Amino acid sequence: MGGTSWLFLVTKGAACVVSGLLLRGLLAGLFAGFLAAGFASVAGEPSIERAIAIESAADAAAGQSPEPQIVSRSVQRGAGLFTASLIYGAALGGLFSLAFAVAYGRVGGFDPRALSALLAAAGFVALVFVPEMKYPANPPAVGAAATIGPRTALYFAILAISILAMVLAVTLITPLAARLGAWNGALVAAAVFIVVAGFAAVAMPAVDEVPAEFPANVLWNFRLASIGARAILWGALGLAFGGMTQIWLMGSAKPHSA
């Protein structure tokens, strides 16, 4: 299946292949974004509402007037949430399809579904899991306004290191597999990623600005919903894109496989 499909893709033309993959990436991204938004609406919005109430009470106790809302909360948790998630999902799906086009036929002998699932898992680990373990998302009322700049810089620093570590690990898979075998090569490549990303996470400074009186359950539920929504986004993207691409490639390759 993999060899036949790859030969078909080469003979069909790069532009046609990329456009077909891009279309499926956008559709899968829209689907994944919708699911992620639905989960965030149900699991994340209650924690945000509680955090906003805590922040408003603290401002009132300090005699501070509330900040004006440019966009109302009803819009934020409804149309705004779904619109942003759909746009983000579509953009992510487009980039994901391009990464798939580069990897397909070059990284192991995986079929489209397996490769898509592996790419989604790698993307989630590198872009979500590692940064969130070091600098987790915070709800309103957590974090000082004066430290937004440094905290943002630290987050993007660990994000960049995690991505580079994943690229390094993926690059090492093929030569390691040739010398150690596919399974052992994959394990060593994974170990390289863990060592590089883990060392960076330990070496970078910690950020802990959670007020002592902030409810632990609100913080926990918010962070769990945050990482859960992105897990759904990446999981749905990988499965939907892999399924659509598998059907497309199998249907396209049938006349050429005889």
Image (cartoon, rainbow, N blue to C red):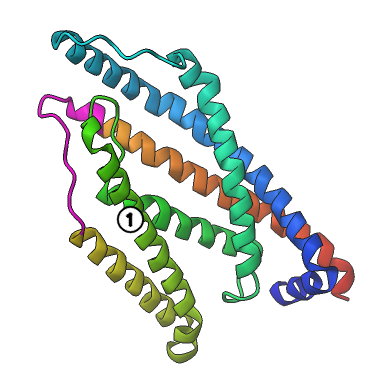
Give the residue drawn at x 38%, y 75%. 187
Give the residue drawn at x 32%, y 44%. 152
Instruction: In the rendered view, tell whether residue 140 sits above or below residue 225.
Output: above
Rendered location of residue 173, percent (x, y): 47, 78
In the image, the segment drawn in magenta is 204-219
Outermost residue toward the left in this view? 212
SS type, badge 1: helix
* Residue 247 in view in this figure: no
Give the residue drawn at x 25%, y 63%. 200
Please indicate whether residue 32 sits to the left or right of residue 157 in the image: right
Query: Counting other residues with Cα less than 10 Å from the Cα at mark 1, is it few (<14), some (14-19), or many (20 or more)?
Result: some
Residue 218 in the magenta stretch? The answer is: yes
Instruction: In the rendered view, tell whether residue 122 sits above or below residue 222.
Output: below
**In the depicted view, which residue is nearer to us: 170 or 43?**
170
Magenta highlight: main SS: loop
Check the picture and name the quadrant holding the C terminus. Answer: bottom right
* Quarter-of-image position of residue 79: top right
Give the residue drawn at x 44%, y 45%. 231
Residue 153 in the magenta stretch? The answer is: no
* Quarter-of-image position of residue 90: top right
Rendered location of residue 60, percent (x, y): 19, 8
> Where is mark 1, residue-wise?
157
Residue type of the residue flagged with mark 1: Ala
Please indicate whether residue 46 sits to the left or right of residue 37 in the image: left
Please indicate whether residue 193 sits to the left or right of residue 205 in the image: right
Check the picture and name the quadrant holding the N terminus. Answer: bottom right
**In the depicted view, which residue is nearer to us: 69 or 128?**
69
Rendered location of residue 203, percent (x, y): 19, 62
**In the depicted view, which residue is nearer to us: 59 or 133?**
59
Count of numbered labels shown in the rendering = 1
Please indicate whether residue 104 sits to the left or right of residue 58 in the image: right
